[in-house]
Structure formats: C-alpha cells, structure tokens
Image (tube, helix red, strand yellow):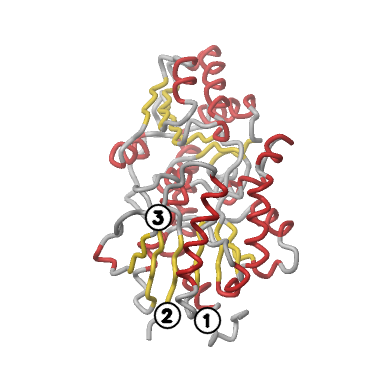
Amino acid sequence: MKRQLLFCTDGIFPHAVGGMQKHSLLLIEQLVKYTDWEIIVIHPHKENVLDPKWNVKEISIPFDFNGFYIWKQYQYSKKISEIVMQYPEAIVYAQGFAVLHDLKKFGNRVIVNQHGLEPFQGLTSNDRLKTLPMRMMERYQFNHAAKVISLGGRLTSILKNEIYYSNDKIVVIPNAVYECELPTKNFEAEELNLLYVGRFAFNKGIDVLLESIKTLNRDGYKSKLKFYVVGKGPLYEKYTSEYQFENVEYVGFASEERLKELYETCDLFVFPTLFEGMPTVVLEAMVHGMPVIVSDTGATAELVNSKNGYLVDAGDKRAFKSAIQAYYQLSADDKRKMSEESRTKVMNNFTWDIVGRKHIELFESMLPSNPLSKL
C-alpha cells in the first residue's frame, strides 16, 4: 500500500499568484517523482489544475478569499480539517494557514511551512500591532504541529523564539529552483544591465532602488547602468509616475519567456526587500549566473555573501547604492568569479532534486514504523 501525503494549500500557481503558490506547484511536481507516495492535493480552485500526467488526486474546495483575510483563512482551514480526518494515516503538509482548525486533534502528523514569517519581521511598532492576530495564529500552528519548516537563516532564530516546548520540531529545508543552461555573460561590457523582479509593494523596498538610481544618475552613472524593473502591484502607478529615468525600463508583468530572457541577458540582480523569507527570484537569478545585491533579511544570507554579491542592511539606500558602484568597478575577472559562485551555490544546495529529497526524508521520518518518528 502506498504511503499517503495530504498536500494542503490556499492556491496553486498560475491560478493563484504568489511565492507560496508557485512553491506549491513546483514542490508537487517534484514529489510525484517518488512513486511510493500517493499525493493528494487540497486546493481552493473550482476544478483540477494540475497536469493529469502527474497522477495526483485533487480535492477541490472552491473558496473566495476576498474579505477579512484572517477569518477567510480560518474558514478555509475548517473545511480542510474535515478532509484531513478522512485520511487518518496520511502525513499532512500545510502551506500557510491551510491547516489551522482542529489542529490539536491531528497535529502529530502535520508539517507547517509558513515561508517568510512576515508577521514576525515588522519594522515598526505599528506593523507589529497590525500583524498581532497573524502572529497568534502562526504560534498556534508552530506549537501544535509535529514539524515546522524553516527556510534557514534568521527565520530559524525567529521560530526558536516562538516555539515554547521544543525546538526539535524545526526542520531547515530551503526553497529551490530548477536547473537551466548557463547563459553566456559579457563581463567586459562597459554598460551593466541590472534586473529587479518583485511586486511594487512597501515591503519590497522599491523606493530604496529608485532613490539609488536617482543618485547614481546624478553621480554620472546614467550611461553606464541600465535597469529593468519587473513587476506590478499597489505602488506601481505611484512609483512609475514619480520616478522617470532614461535608463530605467518598467517592464510590468513579464511572461515566463520574457523573464527567462532577462535573467539570461542581465548582469546583476538587485533586490532591496525590507523583509523576506528565501526569495525565489534571487535563486532564479543565481542559477542563471547572476551576482546579487540583496538586503540582509530572512534567509537571504544563506544565498548571498561576499563571494557572489553584497548583503546590505534593509532600507539603507546609501549602502545599496554603494554596492552597485562597487560591483561596477570590479574587474571582469572578479565579476566572472562572482557569477560562477552564484551558479555553483545553487547547483550544490538549492535545486529541486536536492530539496525534494529533503522533503521525502522528512515525510518518511514521521511514519509510525520509522524509529525516528515522533508520533
């Protein structure tokens, strides 16, 4: 008899857009390769959304998340808990708040992945006040689930502070990307192409990037740096109207083909996020051989160091600008070494083959017959 995994998520990319939703799609795609596991996916879409060739059972709970977010998530988890009880032998993998209601009844077989832990990374007291209900919900999950996944770095420290009884339940499993061919980069070029990919939202630090561009242009870098800014979001109209530069192209939403082209042709990835988990866009840049400038937050220090880029303090515009200048001034050989280090780091630690195997090992450790099981 096959072992069962209930994979519970609030959406699957591209039918729902977001880092967690894309992670759901890619992780499921990897897990189906392990044929001794029966994968049962619970999602809120009205019909089956996964590739039929994957041979995955889908359980649809059509659900509208518009409205009061926390209440909606709880109501959705309530419907999921009814299904979980119908699979008493299954290991349960929960993305976000998909598993919350009645967690005490079956928590000894639940794995929770809250990814970025954003409610615990508020920058101001007002931020922390607003996110208090979410922190309470996440703490409840952490303390009643069997295992809690950390993406690594500072996120592990956050979890250690929030789990009251035992830190043994924390398992570090990073995000991942698929392998790709390494594109040819021109490290001799006098003009650098810089790439940003992310939402136009406060937490992504778009203003840090745009203010840095303003001062770089003023200091004579206008003809030396070309920026491609990919993404949309609530601040898109505001920032694209306030910051008009000849050397900035606002790409807006980019198709997978266009995004792949930008990763292949751009030289340096920039991501001034204010708080984060382990951003997949950084991994995607690295697998394409791009050095990275990123804020030191969440698990970004697991990805970037002085060998393949620059870590800067979140919100520090001066440091972000200085990092761009520092990279520009490197020799072609040093730029090539940074590129190679980014690629090597991903291939050795963050491919889906590696991360998928880590998940399977975790699932197997929780089976009742396994001597390592905590059940």
Direction from residue 110 to residue 237 in the image, left or right: left
Question: Which mark identifies residue 201?
Answer: none
On-image quarter of the N terminus: bottom left
> In what element is the residue under mark 1?
loop
- For label 1, the residue is 367
Which quadrant holds residue 119? top right
Report crowding for label 2: few under 14, some 14 to 19, many 20 or more residues within 10 A (C-alpha).
Answer: some
Report crowding for label 1: few under 14, some 14 to 19, many 20 or more residues within 10 A (C-alpha).
Answer: some
Spot occupied by residue 366 in the image (x, y as percentages of width and height):
55, 78
Compared to residue 268, the image places residue 21 above or below, namely: below
> In what element is the residue under mark 3?
loop
- For label 3, the residue is 44
Which quadrant holds residue 145? bottom right
Can you name the residue that lies furthest to the left here? 53
In this view, the residue in front, 53 or 264, is 53
- For label 2, the residue is 3
In this view, the residue in front, 87 or 118, is 87
> In what element is the residue under mark 2?
strand
The span from disc 2 to disc 3 (Cα, nearest Å) is 24 Å
Say what amino acid the circle numbered 2 marks: Arg
